[in-house]
Image (spheres, rainbow, N blue to C red):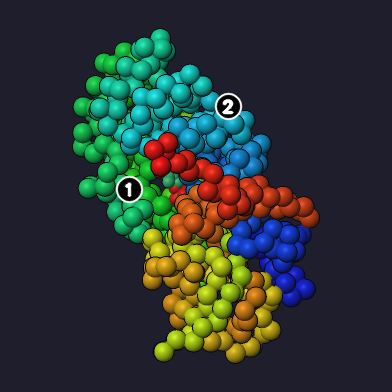
């Protein structure tokens, strides 16, 4: 459930009319609902009640400072995957001991930054990374708390670009080699092993892959403890999927996911961390665009929008489906027609949907993409020299621009001409 509903025939974000925002901010733009963000965070937090736990928001899904601040104020930690994300988390007021550093390619500069600024733990993904981190920690005279990310070799049954826990994926250390790798970690003087990390993929719509992975983590916990390691924290990753359509096959709920965690690893007495991204931010955001033209092609009609693949790349990149709805509520039972819904970018890949049934639309109408809060704004670019689109945050009857649209000048001024030109 989210907070983008029709009210008196027009789309609202909480208590604000989306058309009013469009009139003030211009299109296209992203719009987030605070209530939805908080509600989804709380669902996870409540699902783990009774266990010592921390929900770390995977901020790569939506990293605007205002969103981070809102979630942090509700008690969220952050899962970061770069020095830039670490800096953003700190700038939003997240204390270092609530920041987890993930990712396969952390540089020594990034490690130093996190060790100096404070860090809850590094999720280490390879032996070379272990050596590099131990070296940095030693040079700073500190000890880096680590988990090792295990690749449990389970099929997440999701899109190949977002599967991360199968043999052949670039992530983690094969579970078959875990004991050997933990033995190495224990020997490195700059590291302190505190737990195990696993993250098998994104947009999972079944619980079974989690069940398989967490069961393997539980077995490994006991093995590693028997080997003499301290395993006091389990980072179970993110990845729970969201409904992108209003069909019946809704993904599992955080409550069911929480129950699964208790069932598989609850007996180990570990502190539990999870790193949900999409389920917190995905349905908390929409992208609002305007129809520029209706164009009749040879065998199909096109809706040409002012939003494009550079603003929301998920359809082009993952073949992702988004519900696309008019901001003015269609009359019930009105005739629908099929359109290819496209943006202005000079690529055929700039197609949001093919032969999508839509109620009658006219040039100038506002159109909203639902479920665009995760991996939307963060993946946008200025391709075709289209300035990054603004982000707006709504709370009750208020809204604020939380990232302004750059002017053409702002965009151009970032380039510099070398002296010889
Ligand atoms: C991307 C990612 C997440 C979040 O995944 P979601 O599907 O958005 O929940 C969590 N942990 C790690 C390590 C990731 O790379």
Q: Quadrant of the C terminus?
A: top left
Left or right placement of residue 218 versus residue 327 in this view? left
Query: What residue appears at the point 72 percent right and 72 percent down from the top-left corner?
Result: 10
Q: Residues within 10 Å of mark 1 (few under 14, many from 20)?
A: many
Vertical placement of residue 134 versus 304, above or below:
above
Residue 170 location, x and y as percent?
27, 43
Residue 254 location, x and y as percent?
53, 51
Residue 349 in view (yes/no): yes
3D distance between C-alphas at marks 1 and 2: 28 Å
- Judging depth in this view, the residue of 131 and 300 nearest the camera is 300
Left or right placement of residue 9 versus residue 389 in this view? right
Is the residue indicated by label 1 positioned so its CB lies within 8 Å of ligand 1?
A: yes
Vertical placement of residue 120 versus 138, above or below:
below
Query: What residue appears at the point 24 percent right and 22 percent down from the top-left corner?
Result: 183
Residue 60: assigned label: none
Mark 1 = which residue?
164
Query: What residue appears at the point 38 percent right and 16 percent down from the top-left corner?
Result: 137
Vertical placement of residue 38 versus 221, above or below:
below
State which quadrant residue 140 falls in.
top left
Mark 2 = which residue?
95
Left or right placement of residue 337 versus residue 186 in this view? right
Q: Secondary structure at mark 2?
A: loop
- Judging depth in this view, the residue of 131 and 43 nearest the camera is 131
Is the residue indicated by label 2 positioned so its CB lies within 8 Å of ligand 1?
A: no
Mark 1 or 2, nearer chain start: 2
**Ligand 1 image-quadrant field:** top left
């Amino acid at each position: 459930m989210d907070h983008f509903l029709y009210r008196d025939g027009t789309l609202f974000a909480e208590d604000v009319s989306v058309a009013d925002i469009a009139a003030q901010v211009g299109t296209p733009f992203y719009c987030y609902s605070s209530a939805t963000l908080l509600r989804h965070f709380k669902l996870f937090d409540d699902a783990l009640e009774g266990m010592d736990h921390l929900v770390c928001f995977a901020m790569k899904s939506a990293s605007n400072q205002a969103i981070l601040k809102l979630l942090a104020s509700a008690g969220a930690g952050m899962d970061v995957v770069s020095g830039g994300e670490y800096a953003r988390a700190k700038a939003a007021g997240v204390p270092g001991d609530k920041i987890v550093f993930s990712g396969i390619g952390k540089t020594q500069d990034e490690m130093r930054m996190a060790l100096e600024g404070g860090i809850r733990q590094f999720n280490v993904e390879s032996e070379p990374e272990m050596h590099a981190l131990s070296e940095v920690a030693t040079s700073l005279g500190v000890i880096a708390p680590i988990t090792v990310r295990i690749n449990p070799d389970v099929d997440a049954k999701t899109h190949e670009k977002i599967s991360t826990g199968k043999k052949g994926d670039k992530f983690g250390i094969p579970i078959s080699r875990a004991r050997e790798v933990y033995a190495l970690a224990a020997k490195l003087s700059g590291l302190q092993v505190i737990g195990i990390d696993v993250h098998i993929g994104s947009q999972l719509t079944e619980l079974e892959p989690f069940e398989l992975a967490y069961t393997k983590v539980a077995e490994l916990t006991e093995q590693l403890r028997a080997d003499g390691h301290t395993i006091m924290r389990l980072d179970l990753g993110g990845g729970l999927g969201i409904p992108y359509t209003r069909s019946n096959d809704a993904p599992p709920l955080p409550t069911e996911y929480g129950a699964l965690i208790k069932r598989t690893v609850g007996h180990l007495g570990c502190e539990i961390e999870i790193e949900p991204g999409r389920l917190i931010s995905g349905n908390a955001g929409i992208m609002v665009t305007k129809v520029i033209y209706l164009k009749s092609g040879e065998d199909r009609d096109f809706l040409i929008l002012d939003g494009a693949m550079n603003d929301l790349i998920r359809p082009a990149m993952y073949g992702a489906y988004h519900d696309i709805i008019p901001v003015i509520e269609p009359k019930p039972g009105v005739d629908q027609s099929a359109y290819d819904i496209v943006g202005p970018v000079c690529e055929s890949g700039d197609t949001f949907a093919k032969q999508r049934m839509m109620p009658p639309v006219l040039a100038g109408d506002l159109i909203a993409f639902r479920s665009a809060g995760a991996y939307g704004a963060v993946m946008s670019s200025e391709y075709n020299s289209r300035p990054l689109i603004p982000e707006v945050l709504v709370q009750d009857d208020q809204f604020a621009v939380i990232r302004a649209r750059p002017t053409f000048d702002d965009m151009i001024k970032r380039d510099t001409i070398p002296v010889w030109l």
